[in-house]
Amino acid sequence: MLSFPFTADLREKIRWLMLLRVIVAIVLVGSLIVIQLSATPSVSVRPLMGLVLFIIVLTIGYQAALKRTSRLDILVFVQVVGDLLFETGLVAITGGVTSPFAVTYNFSILTACILLYRRFGFISAALASTLYILLVALQYLRLLPFAGPPLIWDPRDFYVIFLNVFAFFLVAFMGSYLAERLRKTSENLEARDSSYRSLQQFHQNVVESVPSGIVAANEEGVIFSANRSALDILSRGKADVVDKPLRTILGEAAGRLIARAAVNHTGQAHREEEVVATGDGRRIICGMSCCPLVDGEGRRSGWILVFQDITETRRLEGRMRRREHLALIGEMSAAMAHEIRNPLGSLSGSVQVLRESKALDEDERRLMEIVVREADRLNEIVSAFLAYARPKPPSLAPVDLGRVIEETVTLLRRSGAGDPSVSVVTEIAPDLLLSAADEGQLRQVFWNLAVNAVQAMPGGGTISIKARKSADGGPQCIGAEVAVEVSDTGTGIAPEALGKVFLPFFTTKEGGSGLGLAIVYRIIEAHHGRIELESRQGGGTTVRLHLPVAAGIEAPSGAPGIEGSRLR
């Protein structure tokens, strides 16, 4: 058997063909039986019943074969041959050459043309012609007793035979031509449909792959589509975005953009920034632009908004501006600090000499001691500021962070900075080794944090220090990190001061310089680390340090503001 071009739904067509065959056979033969039973019988009913049974048995066999075979072309041709045999039997029973059912051969020929195309359409026409001519020949030779009375040769019968055979081949020609045209049209449509689906999928993939959020809204500003990036940026599901007003999802800036785009008919995109609330409770800065959604005829059918999360960009821009600003201030301040320090030393030395004079009474001597003490305190502030403005170059080496913390805690307990009413509890994991860090600077970090914690508990309390290794290295580190948590049970920090504690010269303590935590932040940032601060007024403070295990040192930067630290 030759192979044929088949459509993908040929199996389904075969099922419909079997069902249609049974219905047509029952209608044709059933109506004939009814006519024969209601009038003077001219044809025996028994052969007609046999034909119906023949079709039913064949259909059952076809159904069984359909489930088992993969050669659907063979199964279709077998069914066409079976139909031709059925039609030959029907014509033979109903009068042979005079039977009105000779036209039923055309059904099988059309079936072959539609399902097997041109070649087998003509083969079916030739087979139908052969069966029909053979039937008429047997009828004239009086070898078909059930086909009616014997026929006497009549030239008009020859003309009827010729017309039927001609009709068979004409149907085969027309049917195969139309079937071929239909097949080619279907193939072209399938190719175009496949190309359209591929192009549509490509466009969908492009939209879904764009890192910017893209939402489409109708003329009323109601969202009907959103890409994956939009959902990720907003931390929302599709059901939380689709069919929602743009202003509800992207804020009032979306409404302003649409209003401006509606007035401007050039199609130029406008841009705004808006603080947007995400699905997980965060607030992010979104930079968004809007342009009309235009259909194929150039008519506006809605709006397209493209947006990005620029929170980190704005934070980095502010950080860079702050670094430049503080670098300039640092240079000026360092010069001024040196100028202050020199006369301050002379003043302190002169007062100390005068204090040794025997001509001074007790009050004058006390005043001079106050001057010397305040001069020393001012000198300490200037020294701390110089350490902040011009830090020493780091000395890089492997550092055992656990040992540094333990030694700092021991020094705190034995020094005057400690308070007997304050207890220190440590929970330090082993092997907290940093590959390249400055041990002296890290000691200063833990000392400043511990002293701040002691000063935050004037009535006594507990300092808890925990250190462990974590797999999360943060955005600036690839690999593991060491997480250190310093907690106290002190007075806590007021909400309005929470974002300022790492700024230089900001302090809530009487007599404090406001440089301790600023230096802490600068050192941690230089080690590519992160600081998180969590505090509740009256409920204590927790400072979390995240230091990458394998990160090196960068040049020191300026002090942070709110953007520079992760405050909670």
Image: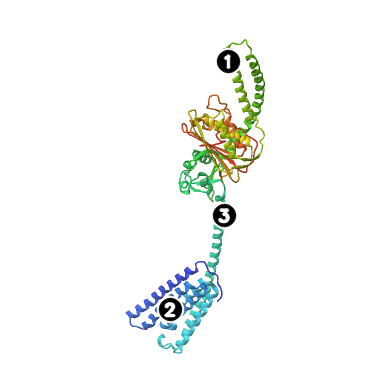
Residues at marks 3 and 2 touching, judged by CB atoms closer than 8 Å = no
Distance between the alpha carbons at the discs numbered 3 and 1:
86 Å
Residue 167 as seen in the image, left or right of residue 447: left
User: SS of the residue at dot 2?
Assistant: helix
Compared with residue 113, is residue 407 higher up or lower down, i.e. above or below?
above
Q: Is residue 560 visible?
A: no
Percent x, y for residue 233?
Answer: 52, 44
Name the residue type under label 3: Phe
- Which residue in the protein does label 2 denote? 101
Residue 142 as seen in the image, left or right of residue 480: left
* N-terminal label among 3 and 1: 3
- Which residue in the protein does label 3 denote? 202
Name the residue type under label 1: Arg
Percent x, y for residue 91?
Answer: 43, 81
Name the residue type under label 2: Phe
Q: State the mark number for residue 366.
A: 1
Q: State the mark number for residue 79.
A: none
